[in-house]
Image (cartoon, rainbow, N blue to C red):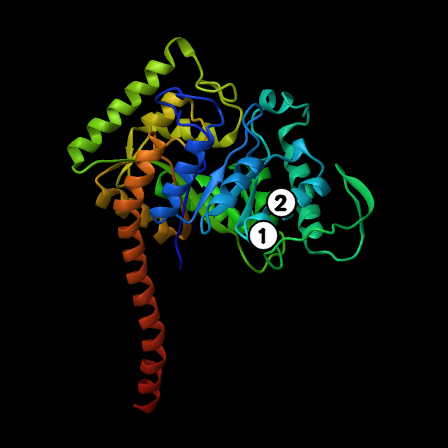
Amino acid sequence: MPVEFLGIGGTHDGSETHARSGGVFDKEYTLRLARAHEDFGWDRVLFAYGSGSPDPAQAAAYVATKLDKLQILLAHRPNVSYPTFAAKTFATLDQISDGRLTVHFITGGNDHEQQREGDHLTKDERYGRTREAIQIIKKAWTSDEPFDFEGEYYRFKDYVSDVKPVQKPRPGVSFGGSSPAAYAAGGAEADIYCLWGEPLAQTAEQIESVRAAALAAGRTDVPRIQVAFRPIIAPTEELAWEKAYATVGAIKDRTKGGQPLTRRHKLTEPENTGSQRLLAVAARGERFDRALWTPTAAATGGAGNSNALVGTPETVAQALLDYYDLGVEILSARGYDMLGDTIDFGRYVIPIVREEVAKRDAERASEVVRAPAEDALAVDG
């Protein structure tokens, strides 16, 4: 089973531990960070979406024209553009990138953040709208004939797009969420289902929920699973833990007095199920399994990808392999010093994981070859 690594396509050098040093869209830094991912063995980067952030599609297009191999995961919230328009945007970007685009659909877990751009649907309604948007965009990418659509959230007639993606039949669709409504929508429509890093047992439960939803939707395949972490690595375990506690200290310094790190996410009582799950795990304890550490999530109010993996590169690599053994094919990682951590993770962790995955694949292949031979011997005997 192949393994892929997803990083972050940041447009400035700020993170939870420190404020950015320049503008919100620093072109030089954006390209430097993307190039570090390409040079150090990562497969793709995510260009995230926020109501006040730079347009991720344009940032992604800028990077795509400068780099030849790095793949792009573009975050998109369906409330910000009509699906037929979005389909053209994505197809054009797939053309610009020579077929390196995957689209990550964000339904939105915070009412206030959604309302900043005029979206007043409830969360369950938003999932229904996202599902319709994905269906429309898929058809716009693949249909050479005009088609009509009559749904609960979208209605149009006689649409056909002249611009088609490079990828055939279409680019991949990525989706995330931890509620029953999310499992239902993503299980039905996603090629990749994204989860935030939780303990192994809870991750296995979520994977089963996604697969069950896919089967309930009548699919014969299931989405590939992606899980996201914040790696904190150092040459020794002692140094890694010193770094981890310094990281949480820096986050707490920035959130003194209950000040949130972003306008999108409160430090307490988050609305979205994924963040609620992260805080529930943190309330149970700080350390789980081989290297999972929760204080980074607790300090940020469970904001997004926020649980850490702490240890030497070997420890963190083995922890990632534990998730791979659960069926996770895409490993997402983002450090707090985005550029430096991208290089260190790519230099020291990714090679270990890839080597171990290759060994596992070789062992499975040999078992497949050996089994028929053993059956033949049994028959001959």
The residue that disc 1 covers is 171
Q: Is residue 254 above or below residue 117?
A: above
Q: Picture quarter containing residue 7?
A: top left
Q: CA distance from mark 1 to mark 2?
A: 9 Å
Secondary structure beneath dot 1 equals: loop
Q: Which mark is residue 90?
A: 2
Nearer to me, 109 or 68: 68
Image marks 1 and 2: residues in contact by CB distance under 8 Å: yes
**How many C-alpha atoms fall within 10 Å of the one at disc 1: few (<14), some, or many (≥20)?**
many
Q: Earlier in the sequence, mark 1 or mark 2?
A: 2
Q: Residue at x 67, y 45 (%)?
A: 87
Q: Position of residue 310 (x, y in %)?
A: 26, 35
Q: Residue at x 59, y 45 (%)?
A: 93
Residue 286 appears left or right of 125: left
Q: Amino acid at mark 2?
A: Phe
Nearer to me, 134 or 72: 72
Q: Position of residue 2 (x, y in %)?
A: 40, 58
Res 176 visible: no
Q: Position of residue 294 (x, y in %)?
A: 33, 29
